[in-house]
Image: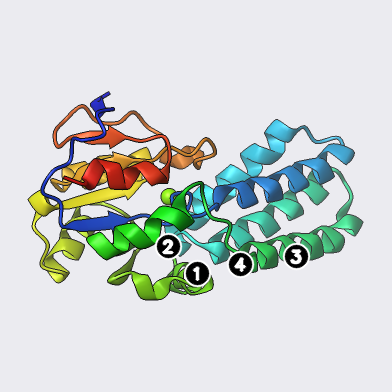
Amino acid sequence: MNVNHDLKRHHGVKNVLLDIDDTLWENNIFFLQSLEWLCGEARQLGIPDRATTSMLNQWETFNIRWKGFGYDSYESSLLLTTGMIARRAGRLDLHAGLRTKALAWTTFLKSHPIQWRPEVEKSLPLLTKKFRTIIVTKGNPKDQMGKVERCGLKHIFDAAEVVPHKHKSCYLDVMKKHNLKAEETVMVGNSPRSDINNAKRAGLRTIYVPHPKTWYREMEPILSDAPVTVEVEHFGQVLQVLEP
Ligand SMILES: [Mg+2]
C-alpha cells in the first residue's frame, strides 16, 4: 500500500475535491440498518441472513447497471428482494406488508437528518476558507444535492459536481471544467476505489479518511502508484496535511 502517514506530506495545494457520503456525513450505516431489518424479517421466515444479503446484492448489481447509483436503484433492489423472500418462504400473503415496510425504509434513507462524521463540523468551515473546495460525489444529482442542501452548509463550498461514476475521466472532466491543475489539487474521501485509486489515475494526490463501514463495493487495496496518498485518522487531520 502506498499510504503515507506523514501528516505534512501534501504541499502546494490550492484546490480540494471532497467526497461527501461517509467522508463528511454518515451514509452507509443507514443502508446497513435497512439490510438488518430485511434479514430480521427473512430470518423469521426461515431464510438465513447470508441468503437475504446475497439476494439484495444481486439485485443491486443488476439495478446499478441500468439505473446507476442512488436511492431509486436501492429502493428497487429492496422491493424486488422482499418479493423473493415472500416467494421463497411460500408466504406471498406477507409480500404487501414487507413492501410497505421497505418503502418506509427508503423514505427514511432519503430524508434522515445529516449526521456529521467526527471533527467535520469543526474543521470543514476552516478548510473551505483556506482552499477552493469542490464537492465531487457520484450518484443521482437529486439525491446527492438533496443531502448537500440538508447539511445546511452548501454556501461554504465553491461548487458541487455530481457524476455518474468516479472514473479517471470524471476527475479529468471536473478539473477541466474548473480549470484546476493536478499538482495543485487533492481528492479527499473514504472509498479506496472511487475516491483514492481513480483520483490517483487522474494524477491527483489523495487523502484517505477511512470509514469502518464503507460500502463493500468500494473496498480494494490502495494503488502503490504515485501520486502519494496520505491516510488520516479523522477528517480533522485533513487540514494538518494541507497546511504549509
Ligand atoms: Mg464516500
Q: CA distance from mark 4 to mark 1?
A: 7 Å
Q: Are marks 1 and 3 in contact (CB under 8 Å)?
A: no
> Which residue is at 43% across, 40% downward?
234
Q: Are marks 4 and 2 in contact (CB under 8 Å)?
A: no
69 vs 200: above or below: below
Q: What amino acid does circle 3 point to?
A: Ala
Alpha-carbon neighbours of circle 2 within 10 Å: few (<14), some, or many (≥20)?
many
Q: CA distance from mark 1 to mark 3?
A: 17 Å
Left of 16 or right of it: where is 138? right
Q: Are marks 4 and 1 in contact (CB under 8 Å)?
A: yes
Q: What amino acid does circle 1 point to?
A: Asp
Q: Which residue is mark 1?
A: 143
Left of 221 or right of it: where is 79? right
Q: Label 1: state its secondary structure.
A: helix
**Along the polypeptide, which appears first: circle 4 or circle 1?**
4
Q: Which residue is mark 3?
A: 104
- The image position of residue 94, as x and y in percent, is 89, 56
Q: Label 4: state its secondary structure.
A: helix
Q: CA distance from mark 4 to mark 2?
A: 13 Å
Q: Quadrant of residue 127?
A: bottom left
Nearest to the eye among marks 4 and 2: give it. Answer: 4
Q: Which residue is mark 4?
A: 110
> Which residue is at 61% across, 67% downward?
110
87 vs 44: above or below: below
138 vs 147: above or below: above
Q: Which residue is mark 2?
A: 139
